[in-house]
Image (cartoon, grey):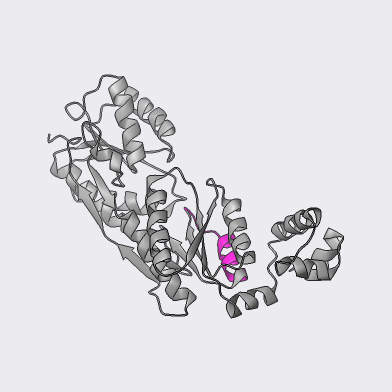
Amino acid sequence: MNKTISDIAQMAGVAKSTVSRFLNGGSVSDDTREKIERIIKQYNYVPNTFAQSLKAKKTSIIGTVVPRLDSFATSQTLIGIDEELRNNQYQMLIANTSQDMQREIDAIYDFARQKVSGIILLAAEVTDAHLKAVEDIGIPVLLVGQQHEQLHSLVHNDDQAGYEMGKHVVEKGHRKIVYIGVTERDQAVGIHRKQGFKRAINECVGCDVTYYETSFKMSEAIITAEAILKESKPTIIVGATDNIALGVMKIAFSNKIQIPQELSVTGFGGYEITEMIHPTLTTVKYHYFEAGQVAAQHIIRLVKGEPVEQCTILDVEIIPRESVDKI
């Protein structure tokens, strides 16, 4: 059952007027604020009158929820968002959730209470709790990096990226292939990228592909790659991200495995570091900065009540480099 202001006030041991003052940005004691905030977060409380006030009085602030800050993709996307928002006299607030899904949900409600005009959400997964939060707050939300039929979405063409990489691998003559992916809870990287790769592989006769899973962290990719190289000898390892590919290269160098003479390696992302290392890494370039700019443009239109296509798909580009040898 939805809680009322009276319920919140009773649980916090304060008057209704105190809760109302807090919700409207008025002055309350630190102790009272902590009590009310804790209860509001616990019950995901957003009163209808508050949602209505958000619609009636828009600010020039856009909230952006990100899963992590130590990511090239995230940082480049944020730079693009910030630049475009500033060019249009908007400001950005950032909430980092450290890949904690509950913190993502809390951030959505927190931004609503701060009266932002719209929210850009970079989420690995969209759950019922996400959808409920978006419905509760009653302000525009744009999903970036993932697609969901109930939300306006902006995505990179992960299926095409996987397909182009798969074609490149088989055209180079590789048939004994390892693909290191990530959890399928991440639809873009974990599902669509791998599906595109499989589609290309299925068009080729005689391919022996083994699929593994690791995390987005390079340290864990190194552990996964080390275990793989102890039990098999693929001619190529395809990492679902550049971080995974860099982890593979690190463990290969540690084991004196020459790249690409003895083992070819590829990734996805197009991180700047991939063209600075030796050998340079074959990858699929994602235009993260441009994605951020488009995301900012779209959330501004949504805030203004202007039409935005339900899903925008951004092109990707394969970059052949030195890390893949022709068999």
Query: In percent of the image, x 64 and y 74: which residue is there?
Result: 51
User: Dividing the image into 4 quarters, which one contains the C terminus?
Assistant: top left
Residue at the (19%, 30%) spot, across then down: 260
Q: Residue 188's image quarter?
A: bottom left
> Does the magenta stretch mainly form a helix, a strand or a loop?
helix
Q: Position of residue 193 (x, y in %)?
A: 33, 51
277 lies above or below 45: above
125 in the magenta segment: yes
Q: Compared with residue 323, is residue 292 higher up or lower down, i.e. above or below?
A: below
Q: Quadrant of the N terminus?
A: bottom right
**Residue drawn at the location 24% of the way across and 36% of the way down:** 276
**Residue 304 to residue 220: above or below:** below
Q: Magenta stretch: give its range.
A: 124-136
Q: Is residue 209 visible?
A: no
Viewer-proximal residue among 79 and 209: 79
**Magenta segment includes 230:** no
The number of callouts visible is 0
Give the percent coordinates (x, y) of residue 251: 33, 25
* 185 left or right of 277 in image: right
Q: Which residue lies at the image location 58% right of the left edge and 78% below the top edge?
A: 55
Q: Is residue 310 visible?
A: yes
- Where does residue 75 sit, x and y in percent of width and height? 41, 49
Q: Could you say which quadrant of the image residue 171 lies in? A: top left
x, y percentage for residue 122? 46, 56
**Residue closer to the observer: 146 or 229:** 146
Say whether residue 227 is left or right of residue 120.
left
